[in-house]
């Protein structure tokens, strides 16, 4: 065996070959360097083994206990809008020129079709509330029912 020294690297070469024989320490370093990666990959696989189809692709739940009879502006619609819309669409702020803290402002949006379009995330409308979660199906149904009934101030 012939030992050749290259600046910064000591290798051993078998006579008749050009391939250096690496010292055992290099293999240990590689093994220990890859071990954390292997453990991480195994943890990812085991973390997903308990997932089932329902957890990965939840189906919308039917509108249970969603009473859309006798929907009023003052009792139902105004409360939904206050919780979800007033922070950006009140008289003092009026983001995009849309005012939703007065019946007149809400009725204007209802009459032009934008109110139902934006809260239901209909194609062609900017989904609202912006940066927030979509309203529940029940709340959307209440707003739609109120609009369909004429968007009266009751």
Image: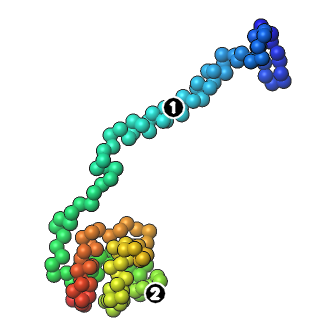
Q: Is residue 2 above or below residue 75?
A: above
Q: Which residue is mark 2?
A: 97
Q: Residues within 10 Å of mark 2 (few under 14, many from 20)?
A: few
* Image location of residue 129, percent across then percent down: 39, 73
User: Which residue is pictured at 40% across the width and 74% down the height?
Assistant: 123
Dividing the picture into quadrants, the one containing residue 100 is: bottom left
Q: Residues within 10 Å of mark 1 (few under 14, many from 20)?
A: few
Q: Quadrant of the N terminus?
A: top right
* Image location of residue 59, percent across then percent down: 27, 57
Q: Is residue 63 above or below residue 1?
A: below
User: Which residue is pictured at 49% across the width and 32% down the height?
Assistant: 39
Mark 1 or 2 closer to N-term?
1
* Image location of residue 149, percent across then percent down: 21, 86
User: Which residue is pictured at 30% across the width and 47% down the height?
Assistant: 53
Looking at the image, residue 83 sits to the left or right of residue 94; the answer is left
Dividing the picture into quadrants, the one containing residue 126 is: bottom left
Looking at the image, residue 66 sits to the left or right of residue 25; the answer is left
Considering the numbered disc 1 on the image, is that residue within a helix, a strand or a loop? helix
Q: Nearer the viewer, residue 29 or 150?
A: 150
Q: Which residue is mark 1?
A: 38
Considering the numbered disc 2 on the image, is that residue within a helix, a strand or a loop? helix
């Amino acid at each position: 065996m012939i030992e050749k020294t290259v600046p910064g690297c000591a290798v051993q070469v078998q006579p008749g070959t050009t391939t250096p024989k690496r010292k055992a320490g290099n293999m240990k370093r590689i093994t220990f360097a890859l071990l954390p990666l292997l453990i991480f990959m195994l943890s990812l696989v085991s973390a997903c083994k308990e997932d089932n189809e329902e957890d990965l692709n939840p189906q919308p739940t039917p509108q249970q206990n969603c009473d859309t009879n006798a929907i009023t502006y003052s009792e139902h619609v105004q409360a939904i809008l206050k919780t979800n819309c007033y922070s950006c669409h009140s008289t003092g702020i009026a983001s995009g020129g849309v005012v939703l803290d007065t019946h007149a402002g809400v009725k204007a949006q209802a009459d032009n079709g934008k109110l139902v379009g934006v809260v239901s995330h209909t194609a062609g409308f900017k989904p609202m509330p912006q940066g927030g979660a979509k309203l529940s199906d029940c709340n959307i149904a209440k707003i739609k029912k109120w609009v369909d009934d004429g968007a009266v101030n009751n």
